[in-house]
Image (cartoon, grey):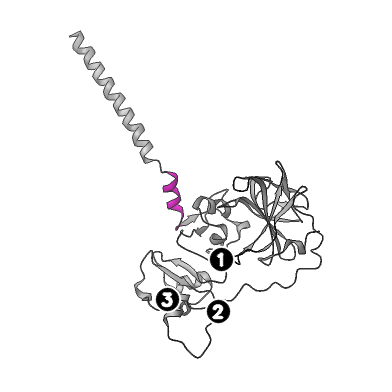
Amino acid sequence: MAQRYLGGERWQARCVFLAFVMLILGGCASAPSETQRLQTIAGNWVTIQRGDTLGAIASRANVPLERLQRFNPGVDSRRLAVGQRILVPSTQERAPSGGPYRYQIRPGDTYSSIARRFGTTAQHIQTANSGLNPSALRVGQLIQVPLRGASSTSRSVANSRPPTNSAPSRPSPRPNPGPVPSQAKGWPWPLDDYRVVRQFGSDSRGTLQPMLLATSRGQRAKAVADGDVRFASSMRQLGKVVIVHHSDNLQSVYALCDSLAVNEGDKVTRGMPLCEVGYSNATQRYDLLFDLRHGGKPIDPRQVLR
């Protein structure tokens, strides 16, 4: 009887142990993977939580910050409110400057609601997607969304139409901000110790390239002028990036950083450290990608730096 009783205790203990193991395994299986978490963010609406920034959300969803901003016109990155909803574009969607945007249909979407969101008209969208029935849109379907004042047709649609006597319209370029303000002169370089390994300008394929500065280990990039930090986070292929907005509609960009010394929303003064320059395995150097923009348009930093 004693042996049978002990055997029963062992059997019960084994059952408890197996149940405990199954509980742990079940908990592990239910925890979402990083890939699943990203899939639930990209392409969906996200509700702003305390501490959220557009840069952090863009990084989590693996989409460029500029694309996230363009899919949420009217959203001020400096005044995000808890509970506010923003749309995170999917990896299939695009938002080139001047349009047309590539947009993925979501439940409840109509040409009118999409037009209101992006400041265009339902007629422009319908014209750009002449082969689609606006009353039979499918969730997940990709459409072209021309912006107001831009070309109302995509290239593929335009090529499929017979030629007319009138010249085809072109996407309107970003407004010309005019000449660089005269007071934006004599700014210091972003590094104390540097050499220019790539000048600002077009490469052999005609692609505009920003300036690249080589430096030594431990060097920190500094603000070239007073301003506000509008972005301080990671970007794909650019490492950690800091973007500072200055007066007179000027912006400076510091990329390929290893660590950041500022946060979004910080006010900085000329010469203040922004980030530590990172090491590039491709060039086997410590490189800083530096870009200056006027009204969002790239300009040659040598116009401003002393």
Q: Earlier in the sequence, mark 2 or mark 3?
A: 3
Task: Confirm or deny contact between disc 2 and disc 3 (CB under 8 A).
Answer: no
* The C terminus - image quarter: bottom right
Which amino acid is tagged 1? Pro
Q: Is residue 36 inside the magenta stretch? A: yes
Q: Which residue is tagged 2? A: 170
Looking at the rendered structure, which numbered label has been put on residue 73?
1
What residue appears at the point 61 percent right and 74 percent down from the top-left corner?
A: 173
Q: As displayed, is residue 35 above or below residue 86?
A: above
Q: Residue at x 38, y 36 (%)?
A: 28
Which label lies toward us, 1 or 2?
Answer: 2
Mark 1 or mark 3: whose residue is earlier in sequence: 1
Between the residue at mark 2 and the residue at mark 3, the CA separation in whole angstroms equals 17 Å
Q: Is residue 272 above or below residue 118?
A: above
Q: Nearer the viewer, residue 305 or 30?
A: 305
Under tag 2, what secondary structure?
loop
Q: Is residue 192 left or right of residue 122?
A: right
Q: Which residue is mark 3?
A: 129
Q: Label 1: state its secondary structure.
A: loop
Q: Is residue 29 left or right of residue 185?
A: left
Residue 292: image quadrant is: bottom right
Q: Is residue 62 visible?
A: yes
- For the record, the magenta segment spans 32-44
Q: In this view of the protein, which residue sits in the foreground, 25 or 238?
A: 238
Task: Give the CA distance from mark 1 to mark 3.
Answer: 22 Å
Dot placed on the residue nearer the N-terminal end, 1 or 2: 1
Label annotation for residue 153 = none
Dominant secondary structure of the magenta stretch? helix
Contact, CB < 8 Å: mark 1 with mark 3?
no
